[in-house]
Image (spheres, grey):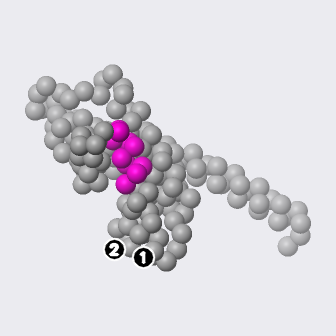
Amino acid sequence: MNKTSDWGEMVKAQGDIWLRLIVFIIGLLVMSFGIDLFIVSNLGATPWDTLHVGLYEHFGLTIGSWSIIVGFFVLGPSALFLKEWPKFGAYLNMILCGVFIDLFLKLPFMVTPDTLTGKIIMFLAGLLINGYGMGIYISAKLGAGPRDSFMLAV
């Protein structure tokens, strides 16, 4: 291989990482919106998000802040069990999800519907949107989130 082709491969790899990073962040945005729909529907949420809501209700801060704090404490044991440092995406996931959760919860239309039908529709929309967002962020292959890493370790 000559220096010209090495340079071309390096430029391609850098361009690829920026595209993957954009896809990753879009996936986290979509997933976080789905998480908020679960929470606001008042019909239930994922186990981790239920923990974050409970910590918020008992100790204050915000749900997103608790998501970041819990993620930090989950990432350490995961790294020990897996015997490897988490990928960059795990840290980014931990921080951005918490920020996005808090931002979406501030939107004026994020209110619990009055009717059971409205709550069910919001919950089901959250389910679809959350799953779609997870698929997007995982497709970027920048690493599992803190809770995903923990589950892989266990």
- Check disc 2: other Cα within 10 Å, few if <14, some if 14-19, many if 20+: few
Foreground pick, 116 / 60: 60
Q: Secondary structure at mark 1?
A: helix
Asked if 104 appears above or below 150 in the picture, the reply is above
- Place of residue 70 in the rendered image (x, y in percent of width and height, measured from the top left): 37, 54
Residue contact between numbered discs 1 and 2, judged by CB atoms under 8 Å = yes
Residue 121 falls within the magenta-colored stretch? no
- The residue tagged 2 is 154
Indicate which disc, 1 or 2, sits on the residue closer to the N terminus.
1
Rendering quarter of residue 38: top left
Q: Residue furthest front?
A: 59
Using the rendered image of the protein, determine whether residue 136 is visible from the camera's viewpoint: no
Q: Which residues make up the magenta segment? A: 61-70
- The C terminus appears in which quarter of the rendering? bottom left
**Which quadrant of the structure image shows residue 102?**
top left
Which residue is under mark 1?
Answer: 81
> Residue visible at 85% across and 73% down?
1
